[in-house]
Image: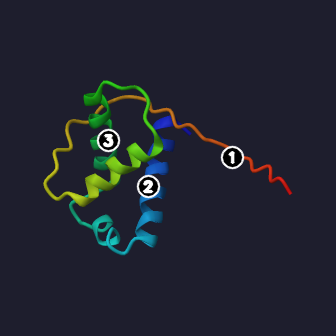
Amino acid sequence: MKGTEHFTRTIAEYLNQRAMTDPLFAPNLMKPNKNIEECITYILNEVQKSGCNGFDDDEIFSMAVHYYDEDDIEVGKAISCQVAVRNWIMLDFGTG
């Protein structure tokens, strides 16, 4: 799977999970004028504007939520790029 496809899937999974646990966000995810492709375009444009190359997961997820929360948001033009998604494996070495 290409990095950008993995990125899109990761964002979509996060948003769906958030909608299941946040009753205030759930209706925003169902807005007929919103979709995951525009959400990704919005995120990529915001990242490009910032001039930074690396972001914390929460920063990116926050941009995705912001896209769905706001009705009148400037998405920007589609950007052709590859996105690298890092996966962390957390190990818990209990002391007991």
Q: What amino acid type is highlighted by mark number 3?
A: Ile
Q: Is residue 22 above or below residue 55?
A: below
Ranked by sequence position, the earlier of labels 1 and 2 is 2
- Residue 51 is situated, as x and y percent measured from the top left of the image, at 30, 24
Task: Name which residue lies at 45% across and 71% down.
Answer: 21
Task: Name which residue lies at 44% across and 30% down.
Answer: 54
- Residue 5 is situated, as x and y percent measured from the top left of the image, at 47, 42
- Residue 47 is situated, as x and y percent measured from the top left of the image, at 32, 33
Q: Is residue 17 above or below residue 88?
A: below
Q: Any mark on residue 12, and which?
A: 2
Residue 43 lies in what quarter of the image? Answer: top left
**Disc 3 designates what residue?**
43
Seen as rendered, the residue at the extreme right is: 96
Q: Is residue 18 left or right of residue 25?
A: right
Instruction: Please name whichever residue, 81 or 90, is drawn nearer the observer in this view of the structure.
Output: 90
Ranked by sequence position, the earlier of labels 2 and 3 is 2
Q: Is residue 3 above or below residue 12?
A: above
Seen as rendered, the residue at the extreme bottom is: 23
Q: Secondary structure at mark 1?
A: loop
